Image (cartoon, rainbow, N blue to C red):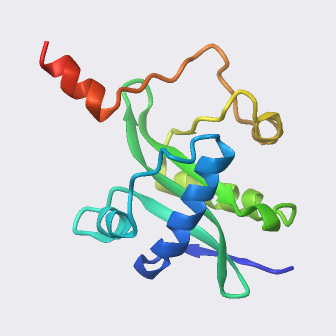
Amino acid sequence: MSFIIREGKKEDMPSVLKLIKELAHFEKESNAVIITVDDLEKDGFGKFPLFKIFVAEMAEEIVGIAIFYPRYSTWKGPTIHLEDLIVTENKRGFKIGSALYKKVIEYGYNKGVERIEWNVLDWNEPAIKFYESTGAKVLRDWDTAQIDRLSMKKYLKK
């Protein structure tokens, strides 16, 4: 089955949100998604876009996405953070995820970034093996830290 990889457009955001929710379900966080289509449209296509997106399209249906944004490393300089890479479950096995991954790497390389980074769940061994096969280092000795909005508020009141 053939597919294309292209830059995402504002009108793609309903399909993008559907895939984001599918990823959240896969990661056992189904209730964690609070963004809306309006948020994605504003944040990705407003005056100062916060992210860039590539979509995989098959038979005029968006079946995969890669969402990423610029970061800055005090050790390396410009980097990119790959936030999400998802292919809808019934379209896996067609190398769509690999093509999206390659497109992000190509984009970053052409932009001159020193590194592309992302998080992968420690139980997602197929993804880890794929990333390592491409030359990526999976840093198993680093933990991700996050503070949510409610915790920020509590902390700031101390």
149 sits left or right of 72 in the view: left
Q: Quadrant of the N terminus?
A: bottom right
The percent coordinates of residue 20 (x first, y second) are 55, 57
The image shows residue 62, relative to residue 81, as above or below, that is below
44 sits left or right of 16 in the view: left
Q: Quadrant of the C terminus?
A: top left
Residue 8 in view (yes/no): no
Toward the front, the furthest residue is 31
The percent coordinates of residue 9 (x first, y second) are 45, 77
Q: Nearer the viewer, residue 93 or 35?
A: 35
Could you say which quadrant of the image residue 107 lies in? Answer: bottom right
The image shows residue 146, relative to residue 66, as above or below, that is above
Residue 65 in view (yes/no): yes
Q: Residue at x 56, y 66 (%)?
A: 18
Q: Nearer the viewer, residue 74 or 23?
A: 23
The percent coordinates of residue 104 (x first, y second) are 59, 56
The percent coordinates of residue 117 (x first, y second) are 55, 38
Q: Residue at x 60, y 63 (%)?
A: 19
143 sits left or right of 25 in the view: left
120 sits left or right of 154 in the view: right
Q: Nearer the viewer, residue 37 or 94?
A: 37
The image shows residue 100, relative to residue 137, as above or below, that is below
Q: Nearer the viewer, residue 91 or 78?
A: 91
